[in-house]
Image (spheres, rainbow, N blue to C red):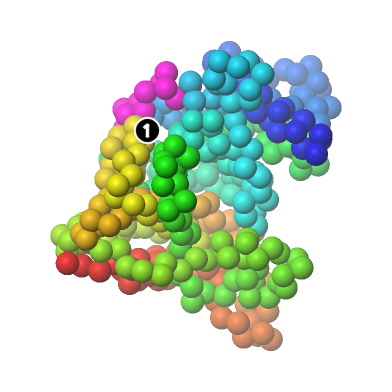
Amino acid sequence: MAMGRRRSSALTRSIQRALFRDPNTFRKTLIGRILAFFSLFYIRLIRFEHERFQKLRNEVWEINELEYHASFRGENDTKTLPLTPLGDMGFSGSTFFSTQNGKFLIKSLPRHFEHSFFREDLFLPYYEYMCTHTNSILTWITDYLNAPYATLGSLMNTTPAHHIIMANTLQGKDQDPAADQWETYDLKPIDYFYPERDLLPDPFVSQDTLNRLADEFPDKIRLRRADCDAFMQMLKDDTDFLRSSNAVDYSLFLVRYPTSSTQDVVGRKNPWRVGFPSVDGEWRYRAVILDFFWAKHKLYAQAMTGVVQTFNVIGRQGPMSITTTAEEYQQKFLTMVESLLEAH
Protein backbone atom coordinates (compact mmCIF):
# COMPACT_ATOMS: atom_id res chain seq x y z
CA MET A 1 0.00 0.00 0.00
CA ALA A 2 2.78 2.43 0.96
CA MET A 3 4.71 1.53 -2.20
CA GLY A 4 1.58 2.16 -4.28
CA ARG A 5 1.15 5.61 -2.73
CA ARG A 6 4.82 6.38 -3.28
CA ARG A 7 4.54 5.32 -6.92
CA SER A 8 1.39 7.42 -7.48
CA SER A 9 2.96 10.44 -5.77
CA ALA A 10 6.15 10.19 -7.86
CA LEU A 11 4.22 9.75 -11.09
CA THR A 12 2.01 12.73 -10.25
CA ARG A 13 5.10 14.90 -9.76
CA SER A 14 6.55 13.61 -13.04
CA ILE A 15 3.40 14.51 -14.97
CA GLN A 16 2.99 17.86 -13.26
CA ARG A 17 6.60 18.94 -13.86
CA ALA A 18 6.40 17.91 -17.52
CA LEU A 19 3.32 20.09 -18.04
CA PHE A 20 4.79 23.14 -16.32
CA ARG A 21 8.33 22.87 -17.74
CA ASP A 22 9.21 24.68 -20.97
CA PRO A 23 9.89 21.82 -23.43
CA ASN A 24 12.37 24.00 -25.34
CA THR A 25 14.73 24.07 -22.35
CA PHE A 26 15.30 20.31 -22.29
CA ARG A 27 18.62 18.99 -23.60
CA LYS A 28 19.77 15.37 -23.42
CA THR A 29 23.07 14.86 -21.60
CA LEU A 30 25.13 11.86 -20.62
CA ILE A 31 24.98 12.68 -16.91
CA GLY A 32 21.21 13.13 -17.18
CA ARG A 33 20.89 9.71 -18.80
CA ILE A 34 22.97 8.08 -16.04
CA LEU A 35 21.12 9.76 -13.17
CA ALA A 36 17.72 9.00 -14.70
CA PHE A 37 18.52 5.32 -15.21
CA PHE A 38 18.70 4.54 -11.47
CA SER A 39 15.28 6.00 -10.70
CA LEU A 40 12.67 3.44 -9.67
CA PHE A 41 9.56 5.60 -9.23
CA TYR A 42 10.20 9.16 -10.40
CA ILE A 43 10.59 9.51 -14.15
CA ARG A 44 11.46 12.60 -16.17
CA LEU A 45 8.78 13.26 -18.78
CA ILE A 46 8.64 15.79 -21.61
CA ARG A 47 5.84 16.98 -23.87
CA PHE A 48 5.68 15.57 -27.37
CA GLU A 49 4.76 18.00 -30.22
CA HIS A 50 3.77 20.59 -27.62
CA GLU A 51 3.12 23.39 -30.12
CA ARG A 52 0.66 21.37 -32.19
CA PHE A 53 -1.07 20.12 -29.06
CA GLN A 54 -1.39 23.68 -27.81
CA LYS A 55 -2.98 24.73 -31.09
CA LEU A 56 -5.49 21.89 -30.77
CA ARG A 57 -6.32 22.91 -27.21
CA ASN A 58 -6.58 26.64 -27.73
CA GLU A 59 -7.70 27.18 -31.32
CA VAL A 60 -9.61 24.01 -32.25
CA TRP A 61 -11.15 22.90 -28.94
CA GLU A 62 -11.22 26.36 -27.30
CA ILE A 63 -9.72 25.17 -24.01
CA ASN A 64 -8.40 28.06 -21.96
CA GLU A 65 -4.69 27.48 -21.29
CA LEU A 66 -4.82 28.91 -17.75
CA GLU A 67 -7.77 26.67 -16.94
CA TYR A 68 -5.92 23.70 -18.43
CA HIS A 69 -2.82 24.27 -16.28
CA ALA A 70 -4.90 24.93 -13.16
CA SER A 71 -6.51 21.50 -13.55
CA PHE A 72 -3.16 19.86 -12.77
CA ARG A 73 -2.44 21.85 -9.60
CA GLY A 74 -3.62 21.13 -6.07
CA GLU A 75 -6.37 23.39 -4.80
CA ASN A 76 -5.00 25.64 -2.00
CA ASP A 77 -3.60 22.74 0.02
CA THR A 78 0.03 22.24 -1.06
CA LYS A 79 -0.01 18.74 0.49
CA THR A 80 -2.90 17.66 -1.76
CA LEU A 81 -1.87 15.82 -4.88
CA PRO A 82 -3.44 17.39 -7.99
CA LEU A 83 -4.16 13.98 -9.54
CA THR A 84 -6.33 11.14 -8.28
CA PRO A 85 -5.19 7.60 -9.14
CA LEU A 86 -7.97 5.48 -10.62
CA GLY A 87 -5.98 2.25 -10.83
CA ASP A 88 -5.83 -0.34 -13.61
CA MET A 89 -8.97 -0.12 -15.72
CA GLY A 90 -8.41 -2.72 -18.41
CA PHE A 91 -6.44 -5.59 -19.92
CA SER A 92 -3.65 -3.44 -21.36
CA GLY A 93 -2.04 -2.72 -17.98
CA SER A 94 -2.73 1.01 -18.33
CA THR A 95 -2.87 3.18 -15.23
CA PHE A 96 -5.32 6.06 -15.01
CA PHE A 97 -5.34 9.36 -13.12
CA SER A 98 -8.01 12.03 -12.99
CA THR A 99 -7.51 15.71 -12.27
CA GLN A 100 -9.24 16.72 -9.05
CA ASN A 101 -11.74 18.88 -10.94
CA GLY A 102 -12.63 15.89 -13.14
CA LYS A 103 -11.93 17.74 -16.40
CA PHE A 104 -9.07 15.56 -17.68
CA LEU A 105 -7.83 11.98 -17.52
CA ILE A 106 -4.25 10.75 -17.80
CA LYS A 107 -3.81 7.27 -19.27
CA SER A 108 -0.51 5.41 -19.58
CA LEU A 109 0.34 3.51 -22.76
CA PRO A 110 2.60 0.69 -21.55
CA ARG A 111 2.54 -1.35 -24.75
CA HIS A 112 5.18 -0.38 -27.29
CA PHE A 113 3.05 -1.06 -30.37
CA GLU A 114 0.41 1.36 -29.08
CA HIS A 115 2.54 4.37 -28.16
CA SER A 116 4.83 3.92 -31.18
CA PHE A 117 1.78 3.84 -33.48
CA PHE A 118 0.44 7.04 -31.95
CA ARG A 119 3.76 8.91 -32.17
CA GLU A 120 5.04 7.65 -35.50
CA ASP A 121 1.89 7.02 -37.56
CA LEU A 122 -1.23 8.55 -36.08
CA PHE A 123 -0.45 11.87 -34.47
CA LEU A 124 0.10 14.10 -37.52
CA PRO A 125 -2.96 12.73 -39.40
CA TYR A 126 -4.97 13.05 -36.14
CA TYR A 127 -3.81 16.65 -35.73
CA GLU A 128 -4.74 17.57 -39.31
CA TYR A 129 -8.08 15.75 -39.12
CA MET A 130 -9.12 17.39 -35.84
CA CYS A 131 -8.17 20.83 -37.16
CA THR A 132 -10.66 20.42 -40.02
CA HIS A 133 -13.37 18.39 -38.23
CA THR A 134 -14.20 20.45 -35.17
CA ASN A 135 -17.33 18.43 -34.38
CA SER A 136 -15.53 15.08 -34.46
CA ILE A 137 -16.31 12.74 -31.57
CA LEU A 138 -12.84 11.20 -31.53
CA THR A 139 -11.52 11.64 -28.01
CA TRP A 140 -9.71 14.92 -27.42
CA ILE A 141 -6.07 14.02 -26.73
CA THR A 142 -4.73 17.24 -25.24
CA ASP A 143 -1.12 16.21 -24.49
CA TYR A 144 1.32 13.34 -24.90
CA LEU A 145 4.12 12.86 -22.36
CA ASN A 146 7.03 10.50 -22.81
CA ALA A 147 10.38 9.80 -21.16
CA PRO A 148 13.54 10.89 -22.97
CA TYR A 149 15.65 8.53 -20.83
CA ALA A 150 15.26 4.87 -19.89
CA THR A 151 14.91 4.19 -16.14
CA LEU A 152 14.91 1.09 -13.98
CA GLY A 153 11.28 1.86 -13.17
CA SER A 154 10.22 1.88 -16.82
CA LEU A 155 12.27 -1.22 -17.65
CA MET A 156 10.73 -3.09 -14.69
CA ASN A 157 7.23 -1.79 -15.57
CA THR A 158 6.82 -0.11 -12.18
CA THR A 159 6.62 3.37 -13.74
CA PRO A 160 5.04 3.91 -17.17
CA ALA A 161 7.03 6.09 -19.55
CA HIS A 162 4.28 7.11 -22.00
CA HIS A 163 1.07 8.96 -21.14
CA ILE A 164 -1.77 10.64 -22.99
CA ILE A 165 -4.01 13.30 -21.46
CA MET A 166 -7.65 13.32 -22.57
CA ALA A 167 -10.76 15.38 -21.91
CA ASN A 168 -12.96 13.47 -19.45
CA THR A 169 -16.34 12.47 -20.92
CA LEU A 170 -17.72 12.08 -17.37
CA GLN A 171 -16.90 15.65 -16.36
CA GLY A 172 -19.58 16.99 -14.02
CA LYS A 173 -20.78 13.64 -12.74
CA ASP A 174 -19.17 13.98 -9.30
CA GLN A 175 -20.82 17.38 -8.80
CA ASP A 176 -24.26 16.17 -9.91
CA PRO A 177 -26.80 15.36 -7.15
CA ALA A 178 -28.14 12.72 -9.55
CA ALA A 179 -24.69 11.13 -10.08
CA ASP A 180 -26.05 7.65 -9.30
CA GLN A 181 -28.32 7.93 -12.37
CA TRP A 182 -25.45 8.38 -14.82
CA GLU A 183 -24.93 5.30 -17.00
CA THR A 184 -21.81 4.43 -19.03
CA TYR A 185 -21.36 1.90 -21.84
CA ASP A 186 -18.13 0.92 -23.60
CA LEU A 187 -19.51 -0.42 -26.88
CA LYS A 188 -17.82 -2.63 -29.47
CA PRO A 189 -19.25 -5.03 -32.07
CA ILE A 190 -20.17 -8.03 -29.91
CA ASP A 191 -20.03 -10.71 -32.61
CA TYR A 192 -16.23 -10.85 -32.39
CA PHE A 193 -14.42 -13.44 -30.32
CA TYR A 194 -12.72 -11.98 -27.21
CA PRO A 195 -10.33 -14.49 -25.61
CA GLU A 196 -10.32 -12.52 -22.33
CA ARG A 197 -14.10 -12.84 -22.12
CA ASP A 198 -14.70 -16.16 -23.85
CA LEU A 199 -11.75 -18.28 -22.66
CA LEU A 200 -10.36 -17.07 -19.34
CA PRO A 201 -12.17 -18.32 -16.20
CA ASP A 202 -13.16 -15.91 -13.44
CA PRO A 203 -10.19 -16.71 -11.13
CA PHE A 204 -7.87 -15.06 -13.66
CA VAL A 205 -9.98 -12.03 -14.56
CA SER A 206 -12.50 -10.25 -12.33
CA GLN A 207 -16.10 -10.33 -13.44
CA ASP A 208 -16.22 -6.55 -13.30
CA THR A 209 -13.39 -6.29 -15.83
CA LEU A 210 -15.00 -8.93 -18.02
CA ASN A 211 -18.24 -7.00 -17.99
CA ARG A 212 -16.42 -3.86 -19.16
CA LEU A 213 -14.87 -5.65 -22.12
CA ALA A 214 -17.85 -5.32 -24.44
CA ASP A 215 -20.98 -3.72 -23.00
CA GLU A 216 -24.46 -3.89 -24.48
CA PHE A 217 -26.76 -0.88 -24.41
CA PRO A 218 -30.16 -2.16 -23.21
CA ASP A 219 -32.23 0.62 -24.78
CA LYS A 220 -32.39 2.90 -27.84
CA ILE A 221 -30.98 6.36 -28.44
CA ARG A 222 -34.11 8.26 -29.43
CA LEU A 223 -33.44 11.24 -31.70
CA ARG A 224 -35.05 13.18 -34.52
CA ARG A 225 -34.35 11.55 -37.86
CA ALA A 226 -32.21 14.49 -39.00
CA ASP A 227 -30.09 14.18 -35.84
CA CYS A 228 -29.69 10.41 -36.41
CA ASP A 229 -28.50 11.05 -39.94
CA ALA A 230 -26.07 13.78 -38.81
CA PHE A 231 -24.69 11.55 -36.04
CA MET A 232 -24.12 8.62 -38.42
CA GLN A 233 -22.43 10.88 -40.96
CA MET A 234 -20.11 12.21 -38.26
CA LEU A 235 -19.30 8.65 -37.19
CA LYS A 236 -18.65 7.65 -40.77
CA ASP A 237 -16.21 10.54 -41.22
CA ASP A 238 -14.40 9.67 -37.99
CA THR A 239 -14.18 5.94 -38.75
CA ASP A 240 -13.12 6.68 -42.35
CA PHE A 241 -10.16 8.47 -40.80
CA LEU A 242 -9.42 5.54 -38.48
CA ARG A 243 -9.73 3.08 -41.37
CA SER A 244 -7.28 5.15 -43.43
CA SER A 245 -4.84 4.86 -40.50
CA ASN A 246 -5.41 1.07 -40.35
CA ALA A 247 -6.83 1.25 -36.81
CA VAL A 248 -9.14 -1.40 -35.31
CA ASP A 249 -10.64 -2.36 -31.94
CA TYR A 250 -11.81 1.15 -31.02
CA SER A 251 -15.01 1.57 -29.04
CA LEU A 252 -17.89 4.02 -28.62
CA PHE A 253 -18.01 5.29 -25.06
CA LEU A 254 -21.65 6.25 -24.47
CA VAL A 255 -22.88 8.15 -21.41
CA ARG A 256 -26.47 8.99 -20.60
CA TYR A 257 -27.79 10.98 -17.68
CA PRO A 258 -31.12 12.66 -16.77
CA THR A 259 -32.10 15.75 -18.74
CA SER A 260 -32.63 17.55 -15.42
CA SER A 261 -28.83 17.50 -14.92
CA THR A 262 -27.11 20.48 -16.55
CA GLN A 263 -23.39 19.80 -16.29
CA ASP A 264 -20.89 21.92 -18.19
CA VAL A 265 -17.82 20.62 -20.01
CA VAL A 266 -14.42 22.08 -20.76
CA GLY A 267 -13.76 23.77 -24.09
CA ARG A 268 -15.83 23.87 -27.26
CA LYS A 269 -19.51 23.07 -26.66
CA ASN A 270 -19.96 20.28 -29.18
CA PRO A 271 -23.46 18.79 -28.73
CA TRP A 272 -22.29 15.20 -28.19
CA ARG A 273 -19.76 16.35 -25.59
CA VAL A 274 -22.12 18.64 -23.67
CA GLY A 275 -25.03 16.19 -23.77
CA PHE A 276 -27.35 15.65 -26.74
CA PRO A 277 -31.03 15.62 -25.62
CA SER A 278 -33.22 12.64 -26.48
CA VAL A 279 -36.37 13.38 -28.44
CA ASP A 280 -38.58 12.27 -25.53
CA GLY A 281 -36.84 14.70 -23.15
CA GLU A 282 -35.79 11.97 -20.71
CA TRP A 283 -32.03 11.67 -21.29
CA ARG A 284 -28.95 13.51 -22.42
CA TYR A 285 -26.24 11.57 -24.27
CA ARG A 286 -22.51 12.02 -24.54
CA ALA A 287 -20.50 9.97 -27.02
CA VAL A 288 -16.80 9.68 -27.82
CA ILE A 289 -14.66 7.21 -29.79
CA LEU A 290 -11.88 5.75 -27.62
CA ASP A 291 -8.89 3.40 -27.80
CA PHE A 292 -7.83 3.71 -31.45
CA PHE A 293 -4.20 2.71 -30.82
CA TRP A 294 -4.27 -0.81 -32.27
CA ALA A 295 -2.90 -0.73 -35.83
CA LYS A 296 -3.06 -3.68 -38.19
CA HIS A 297 0.37 -3.03 -39.69
CA LYS A 298 2.25 -3.11 -36.38
CA LEU A 299 4.35 -6.20 -35.70
CA TYR A 300 2.44 -7.24 -32.57
CA ALA A 301 -0.91 -7.07 -34.37
CA GLN A 302 0.47 -9.12 -37.24
CA ALA A 303 1.82 -11.70 -34.81
CA MET A 304 -1.52 -11.85 -32.97
CA THR A 305 -3.32 -12.37 -36.28
CA GLY A 306 -1.14 -15.40 -36.97
CA VAL A 307 -1.69 -16.78 -33.46
CA VAL A 308 -5.47 -16.38 -33.67
CA GLN A 309 -5.65 -17.91 -37.15
CA THR A 310 -3.65 -20.90 -35.89
CA PHE A 311 -5.86 -21.17 -32.81
CA ASN A 312 -9.01 -21.05 -34.94
CA VAL A 313 -7.86 -24.05 -36.96
CA ILE A 314 -8.40 -25.97 -33.73
CA GLY A 315 -10.86 -23.90 -31.73
CA ARG A 316 -12.96 -22.42 -34.56
CA GLN A 317 -13.91 -19.45 -32.39
CA GLY A 318 -14.22 -16.90 -35.18
CA PRO A 319 -12.49 -13.55 -35.87
CA MET A 320 -11.22 -11.20 -33.18
CA SER A 321 -11.67 -7.44 -33.29
CA ILE A 322 -7.90 -6.93 -33.02
CA THR A 323 -7.14 -9.18 -35.99
CA THR A 324 -9.88 -8.26 -38.44
CA THR A 325 -9.33 -5.79 -41.29
CA ALA A 326 -9.80 -2.06 -40.71
CA GLU A 327 -12.54 -2.03 -43.39
CA GLU A 328 -14.53 -4.86 -41.80
CA TYR A 329 -14.20 -3.43 -38.30
CA GLN A 330 -15.49 -0.05 -39.47
CA GLN A 331 -18.48 -1.69 -41.16
CA LYS A 332 -19.43 -3.69 -38.08
CA PHE A 333 -18.86 -0.69 -35.81
CA LEU A 334 -21.20 1.53 -37.85
CA THR A 335 -23.80 -1.24 -38.05
CA MET A 336 -23.65 -1.61 -34.27
CA VAL A 337 -24.19 2.11 -33.68
CA GLU A 338 -27.00 2.33 -36.24
CA SER A 339 -28.82 -0.49 -34.43
CA LEU A 340 -28.82 1.63 -31.24
CA LEU A 341 -30.58 4.59 -32.86
CA GLU A 342 -34.34 5.09 -32.97
CA ALA A 343 -35.36 7.85 -35.40
CA HIS A 344 -38.46 9.96 -34.78
Residue 280 image offset from top left, x and y in percent: 22, 60
- 278 and 154: which one is in front? 278
The answer to whether residue 289 is magenta is no
Q: Is residue 89 visible?
A: yes
Query: Does residue 261 appear to the left or right of 342 in the view shown?
Result: right
Q: Give the image quarter of residue 38.
A: top right
Q: Is residue 241 visible?
A: no
The answer to whether residue 66 is magenta is yes
Which residue is situated farthest in the right direction here? Answer: 38
Q: In the rendered picture of this protein, how many numbered marks are placed on residues?
A: 1
Q: Which segment did they paint magenta?
A: 58-69
Residue 149 image offset from top left, x and y in percent: 71, 28
> Is 24 situated above or below 164?
above
Q: Give the image quarter of residue 313.
A: bottom right
Which residue is situated farthest in the front direction here? Answer: 177
Which residue is drawn at the image coordinates 65% and 57% (left, top)?
91
Determine whether the residue tagged by mark 1 lies in a helix, strand or loop: loop
Residue 43 image offset from top left, x and y in percent: 71, 28
Image quadrant occupied by the N terminus: top right
Tag 1: residue type? Answer: Val
Our reading of the magenta stretch's main secondary structure is helix
Which residue is drawn at the image coordinates 77% and 24% (left, top)?
36
> Is 180 situated above or below 100?
below
Residue 227 image offset from top left, x and y in percent: 20, 57
Task: State the residue position of label 1.
Answer: 266
Within 10 Å of disc 1 (Cα), the crowding (few <14, some 14-19, many 20+) is many
Which residue is drawn at the image coordinates 42% and 67% (left, top)?
217
Query: Does residue 270 appear to the left or right of 290 in the view shown?
Result: left
Image quadrant occupied by the C terminus: bottom left
Which residue is drawn at the image coordinates 20% and 59% (left, top)?
279
